[in-house]
Amino acid sequence: MGSLLVAGTTSDAGKTTVVTGLCRWLARQGVRVAPYKAQNMSNNSMVCADGAEIGRAQWIQAVAAGAEPEAAMNPVLLKPGSDRRSHVVLMGEPWGELTARGFLTERAELAKAAFAAYDDLASRYDVVISEGAGSPTEINLRQSDYVNMGLAQHTKAPVVVVGDIDRGGVFASMFGTVALLDAADQRLISGFVVNKFRGDVSLLQPGIDMLSSVTGRPTYGVLPWLPGLWLDSEDALDVPARRLSQDSSVLTIAVVRFPRISNFTDLDALAVEPTTSVFFTASPAEVRDADLVVLPGSRATTSDLAWLRETGLADAVASRVADGRPVLGICGGYQLLGGEISDPQGVEGGGNHTGLGLLPVATTFAVEKVLARPAPTAYEIHHGVVTVTGSASEFPGGCRSGVVWGTIWHGLLDDDTARHAFLAEIAALTGKPAPDGSVSFAAQREARLDLLADAIDEHLDTAALLALIESGTPADLEFVPPGAPKLSAP
């Protein structure tokens, strides 16, 4: 039936939101639709039913589409371990490490796998909605690009550019996105979507009309600011946006914001409860004062352990445990709460490290990554193998000692029964209200997806978008000067 690539003027412009909404909207029309992102750079990932690891955003997009999540939907996943080095997951499996400079020379192999994955999806679904990465006008990377315009050229898919008006400068960035591309790439840019608008849309119309006049391309609609919308996040850009209530009567949950935080979507389930207030912090005072502290996942456990000590957060966590105040560690956070952390194979640089010593467990890093789905909502993604070394009570995926809990399982608290039972214990320890057990996290996720699809239906020209998907890029799109010299690969 067709395809569409949703690009953005910048990272976090709303590509993920629009792709997710389109997937749910098309699924409602009875279309067999699949999401796709050639390359995702994110430490928020998910394990599919077959054990493949993909970006969390593509997983939720597949859920929105009513499709089974699979590796082909995110064939290349880069998981940053430092500013210059990333762990590469290729077609759902560990592939190796990649440096920033090495990435320029390895792209051909990754591109080949990414294009093959797209072609496979396109052969099995009516529509593939692709998400770009960053901006399509990454002119320094264009000759080896396979994520934005390189992908669009491979698929001949029309491209719609999304801009976040809440950040300002949306018209300039949309115009510049087109004007800096070469003629071949410009021919695929078919129009725009404005995201996160607050106010009277009629006030925006003069800008939309001028953008159309100078680019020869339409704006397919203006999505409003949706304050009740939050989706499974792609990366740490979204961390500050998590909910923080000022109600002192609710259970305050401080999540330590590691420099290499990963899979912080674990906390989304806690945030949906009306009796909780979840926030991210790097403040020792806030860690001491919260009712519950969570040490989340980490892509660089030993590095984040050193950071905990340097910032005084390690002492703050130890102090609250000594005072009988609860702490939960998840995956990397669980490993940090233990004693010895051994890295004989150099997975994280090698050596032996001493954890916080608050749980009787020891961790040994193994080269082989564990990817598993041990329970309906739970999944495992880790190199660190945790062993209980002393007396502790059982806890799903881990153990408990006094007021300290640890689990290697991500997604444990997505299970309503497990979450309500855990929070009831925390409430009893702190004297704060316990949840009444009525909140269904899965139902709330579905409601958010439907809310997004409703916004797509109401605020975008879905008939025009459907025609674009079915018929492809219009033949009469204007060239926008100055354009770039030929940048695409030969």
Image (spheres, rainbow, N blue to C red):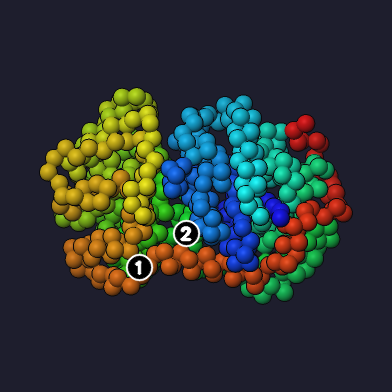
Q: Depth check: 299 or 308 in front?
A: 299
Secondary structure, mark 2, is helix
Point out residue 418 in the picture as x, y percentages from the top left corner: 28, 60
Give the residue at mark 2. 241
479 relative position to 98: left or right: right
The label nearer to you, 2 versus 1, is 1
Q: What residue type is disc 1 on?
A: Glu
For the point 38% across and 31% down, the residue is 368
Residue position for label 1? 273
Q: Please tell me which of labels 2 and 1 falls first in the chain.
A: 2
Label 1 CA crowd tier, 10 Å (few <14, some 14–19, many 20+): many
Q: Position of residue 158 (x, y in %)?
A: 74, 52
Q: Amino acid at mark 2?
A: Ala
Please indicate, yes or no, whether residue 193 appears anywhere in the rendered image: yes
Q: Nearer the viewer, residue 101 or 93?
A: 93
Q: Relative to 204, is 366 on the left or the right? A: left
Name which residue lies at 25% across and 43% down: 337
Q: Is residue 312 visible?
A: no
Callout 2 crowding tier (Cα within 10 Å): few <14, some 14–19, many ≥20:
few
Q: Are marks 2 and 1 in contact (CB under 8 Å)?
A: no
